[in-house]
Image (tube, rainbow, N blue to C red):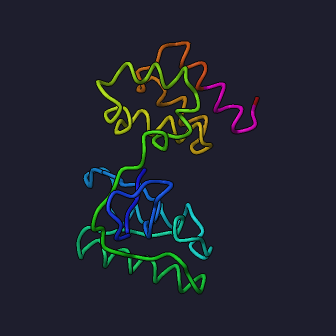
Amino acid sequence: MGYAGGTQKNPTYHNLGDHTETVQLEYDDRKISYEELLNLFWQNHNPAAARPLQYTSVIFYQDENQAELAQQTMQKIRERRGRLYTRVEPLETFYRAEDYHQKYYLQRIPQLTKELRLQYSDFRSFVDSTAAARINGYVAGYGTMDTLRNEIADFGLSAAAEHLLLEIVSTVHGRK
């Protein structure tokens, strides 16, 4: 979680200036292509919704190939849906958001956060971990119970923490 797209140096949540809240995604292009990520992006948000600048939908690209692919996929969506408010812009600087914004949903569950934090040497390693990202998504209501059951052993949690996570996600999905 962080901020990008603006001109103000070192933005914060309460002093955002002209930046937009965003995430920076690192990926292995041997496992998923940039185009596949773009398709997931378009499938999982409403590009036709007008939002305040802080929450504007933006694809930040790092090179011309990414810019071209982003524009191509956006054009396909525009042809189907009409006007879009999503923008495509170069990434100049990404500023990490404050610690309390990182893995926001996960941090609202102290038992899980405490156990995961023990696995990492510092807060940044915790924030950057795939396990924390996946768990944060599940407790926020993304993913399925089947997928969680298939990968929960990879998170390095105790049996008690696994049980807690399954209970929370089950409740989030209305299966309690």
Residue 102 horizontal side relative to residue 10, left or right: right
x 60%, y 76%: residue: 48
Q: Nearer the viewer, residue 122 or 30?
A: 122
Horizontal side of residue 117 vs 149, given as left or right: left
Q: Quadrant of residue 108?
A: top right
Query: How many numbered marks, from 0 up?
Result: 0
The quadrant in which the C terminus is found is top right
At horizontal 29% and vertical 71% (from top left) the residue drawn is 66
Relative image position of residue 18 (x, y in whole percent): 44, 70
Residue found at x 48% / y 63%: 41
Q: Main secondary structure of the magenta part?
A: helix
168 drawn magenta: yes
In this view, 36 is above or below 50 = above
Q: Which residues are magenta?
A: 166-175
Residue 133's x, y, as percent? 44, 39
Q: Is residue 6 left or right of residue 28?
A: right
| Residue 12 belongs to the span the image colors magenta | no
